[in-house]
Every structure is written in structure tokens, then in C-alpha cells.
Amino acid sequence: MEIEKVDKNFARQKPITKEGKTLYSIPSPCFSLYGIEYDEKAQGFVRLSPEYARSVSEGVEVLSRHTSGGRMCFSTDSKVLEITATYSNFWEMAHMPLSGACGFSLFETTEQGEKFVANLGALHSDKQGFTAMAQLTGDMRNYVLYFPLYNRIDSLTVGLTEGAMVKKLNPYRDIAPILYYGSSITQGGCASRPDNTYQGVICKRNRIDFISLGFSGGAKAEPAMVKYLAGIKCSLFVCDYDHNAPTAAYLKDTHYPLYKQFRAAQPNTPILFISRPDITRDKEGEERLKIIRSTYLKAKKEGDNNVYFLSGKSFYGKRHPENFAVDGFHPTDYGFALMADKIYKKMCTIDKKFRGENYD
């Protein structure tokens, strides 16, 4: 017996009939994209061009097609939102729900913050794509649709009530995006929804756009990647690739040079160095922590007062330690919320502009 026959709350809503909707192929002038773009040559959404990603590594080339951190923003008075997503590489993981890996999250933006509307996700049988629908108010409202964390989206079609108005939206403050670089945790493993990464939680707090360059197993501060990072205009650079450095020696050889190259390109951008939260699970954990902190201290000694350091040891605290991570490494939603809280508070000490209007 299927679960929706036992509990109707698990059932998908039926798609709109063709006669009752207007279809939009994304990208479209009526919708704004953030954190991703559509690449005609790649025929899909990307976080950086596949050609450039290929120059970094094979892993980054693959994961650059995953839409982690991608958002689509729009205003509409439609009574429903229907999305049809297609993909050619369906990623399923035993320790991460499809709602985060392959699903979309829809939020309404209000003066008080973002209000959850629906998770639009795939089933295990949806190997090539899926169609899902959410009920809207029918009044002109502002929306943000968060893209999947661990899947490539080749095409996205949006269906709205026939005759409904729709226009592009910029819900973010007039501040350059926050740039994040790191490992699978930065990519979002293993959040249950794409908005529940620590970057997503912070964005919902301060309404500042962000760019998520988290690559599972692939964040190794390669020269090509460092050059790319240094060229991205941002209001803050959060450097978090500790987990993917193969050894402490590798981290030592790459961490300070990454800082120097980024700083040479962006002399006035604040940099926040953070370390892995699961430090005790690696025999080199303490050594890695010292290496990251040493970059910070050396930069300060050289006169750079725009660098900051946050130890991953501080993220989780001591309450309910068994609930921080799914597998000992990748955070649960609870773990991500705790990380977001500590990183957000650190940001607010760096500059008051990172503080959200509705949060302490």
C-alpha cells in the first residue's frame, strides 16, 4: 500500500490541466536567478562554467552542475505554482533525503522574513525528472524558489494560473553577495531542504544574496579555483575547505597562499576563516585547526585587520551531541541551524551591515 493512501498529507497535488495554465521556460525575463545561471552550451543550470570547472578538477566539473545555493525569485498573483524539472543524472544517497538532494523549496518573502510555502520534490521513481505543484494565495506575493543541493537540473518549466501576472524580483539588500567556498557541508550535505544549509539560513536572516561554491570532496584550493574565487566581487569571503584538504600538510601548503592571492585581488574584502566542526573525528583535527588559525594570525601580524577566524569547535556546543550530524560528519538540519547561528553572529561582529533587520 502506498503511503498517500494511509496519510493524504504525503500525496502530491495534481498538476494543472494544460488549458488552465501558462508555461514559462526558465531562464525567463519574468524570473530572476541568483547563485546559478543557465548555460546554453551545457544545456543546464550551473554554478560556474563547465569549461572552467574542468580546469579545476573532474569532481568540480561534475559538481558545478549541481545547483546548490541556486534561487529563483519572482512576484505573482497566481493561485498555483507548478514546476517540471528534468535531469539526466539522478543522485540518490542513503543518508540524505531527496527533499534536500533533489527537491525545491518555495518561500514567500514578507517584511518579517521568508515564510515556508512548500517543498517540491522528487520520488525515488523519478529518474529523469518530475512535476510538482503548490497552492498559492492568488494575491500578488513575492516568492523565492530554492534549487536542489545535489542534482543537476537540465531544464525547469514553471506553470502559473492562466492570466496570472508574474514579474522578476530582487528580494535582497543592496550589498554584494557573500561568497562561500568549502566542502560537502558547504554544498549542503545532508540538509533535508535546500534552504536549510547554513548559508540559506543566514540569507533568510539578513536578506543578503550569496554564492555557494561547496564541492563534495572537491574543495582543495587548486590554483584555478583560487583564481576564480579571487575574481568574484563579494561583501565577505567565508573560507571553509578544511574537510577536503587530503592531509594537514596539504592544508598548510595551500591555506595561506589562498589567502594571499585572494587578498591581492580584493584588498578591502573581509575574509572569515572557519574550521571543520567534527574536529575529534580526525587524528589531524587539532593540527588542522592550528594551521587555519596560523593563517589568520600571520595575516594580522602583517597588518591585515580585515581577517577573522571562527573555530568549528564552537558550532555545536554540548546539548544533544548525537543530533548534530547524520553520519558523524554531515550536519542534520539541527546541526546546520547551530552552524548558521554561530557564523551569523560572527558576521555581525565583522560589520553591522550583515545583521538582519528582524534578528538579534
Image: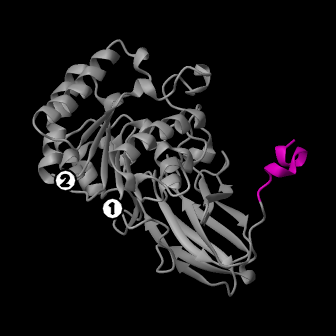
Up-down: is 204 above or below 253?
below
Q: Which residue is mark 2?
A: 268
**Three-letter amino acid code of the residue under disc 2:** Asn
Q: Say whether residue 7 is magenta.
A: yes
What span is in magenta? Answer: 1-12
> Image height check: is 195 above or below 75?
above
Count residues near mark 1 (Cα–Cα under 10 Å), then give few for <14, some for 14-19, many for 20+: some
Rendered view: 17 above or below 218? below
Q: Which mark is residue 176?
A: 1
Judge left or right: residue 171 versus residue 17: left
Q: Of the residues shown, which amino acid type is indicated by label 1?
A: Ala
- Left or right: where does residue 273 sit relative to residue 352? left
Q: Nearer the viewer, mark 1 or mark 2?
A: 2
Q: Residue 43: percent from the left, percent from the top?
A: 41, 65
Q: Compared to 15, does 68 lie above or below?
A: above
- Name the image quarter holding the N terminus: top right
Residue depicted at 25% across the width and 28% down the height: 292
| Residue under the point 48% across and 26% down | 329
The image shows residue 129 at horizontal and vertical percentages of 59, 57
Q: Tell me: 96 left or right of 221.
A: right
Q: Position of residue 103 (x, y in %)?
A: 60, 52
Q: Mark 1 touching mark 2, by CB under 8 A?
A: no
Say which of 292 and 299 sits in front: 299
Q: Nearer the viewer, residue 88 or 318?
A: 318
Within 10 angstroms of label 2, few (less than 14), some, or many (20 or more) residues?
A: few
Q: Residue at x 82, y 51 (%)?
A: 9
Secondary structure of residue under mark 1: loop
Q: Which disc, if any, is residue 56?
A: none
Q: Is residue 65 visible?
A: no
Helix, strand or loop at disc 2? loop
Looking at the picture, the colour scheme in use is one colour
